[in-house]
Image (cartoon, helix red, strand yellow):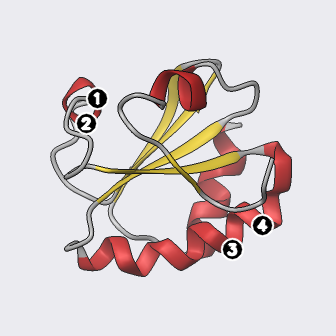
Amino acid sequence: MANTTIAVTDDSFEAEVLNSEVPVLLDFWAEWCGPCKMIGPILEELATELGDSVKIAKINIDENQATPPKYGIRSIPTLLLFKDGEIVGQQVGAIAKSQLQAFIQENT
C-alpha cells in the first residue's frame, strides 16, 4: 500500500473503505472548498507518517454523488473514520494536524 492518500469513487467505495483490513479515514471534499484545500496537505503528511496502520482516502463529492447522501454529508470537509466497515468517528471542518492525529488515535 502506498503511503499517500487514495482517491475513492462511488464504485470503489465498498472495496477501499468498507472492506478495508485497516481503519480508513475518508475525507469528503470538493475542488471549490477552501477548508478542504487547507486540510489536504495535512492528510498527505498523515498518510506518510501513519503508513499502513490507517488508510487515508478522499472522495470528491462533485464527481461521486451516490456515496455522500448515504452518510448524511451536509458540509465539507467532513472526515469519517471507518473501522471494520463501520463509522467509529466523525469530524466536520478543517482542524489542525495535532487535532486530527488525536482524533485518529482515539478512534482506532
Task: Compare marks 2 and 4 and give the one earlier in the sequence.
Answer: 4
Task: Give the alpha-carbon distance from disc 2 to disc 1, as whole Å.
Answer: 5 Å
Q: Nearer the viewer, mark 4 or mark 1?
A: 4
Q: Residue at x 25, y 36 (%)?
A: 68
Viewer-side residue, 108 vs 14: 14
Task: Compare marks 3 and 2 and give the one earlier in the sequence.
Answer: 3
Q: Residues within 10 Å of mark 4 (few under 14, many from 20)?
A: some
Residue topped by disc 1:
71
Q: Which mark is residue 97?
A: none
Three-letter residue code for mark 1: Tyr
Q: Residue at x 78, y 55 (%)?
A: 2
Circle 2/circle 1 CB separation < 8 Å:
yes
- Element under disc 3: helix
Left or right for 64, reference 22: left
Task: Give the alpha-carbon distance from disc 3 to disc 1, as whole Å.
Answer: 26 Å
Count of numbered tags? 4
Q: 10 above or below 3?
A: above
Q: Residue at x 26, y 63 (%)?
A: 30
Three-letter residue code for mark 3: Glu
Residue topped by disc 2:
68
| Res 49 → quadrant | bottom right
Q: 104 above or below 38?
A: above
Task: Give the alpha-carbon distance from disc 4 to disc 3, as whole Å.
Answer: 5 Å
Q: Which mark is residue 45?
A: 3
Three-letter residue code for mark 2: Pro
Location of residue 10 in the rendering, given as x and y in whole percent from the top left corner? 35, 32
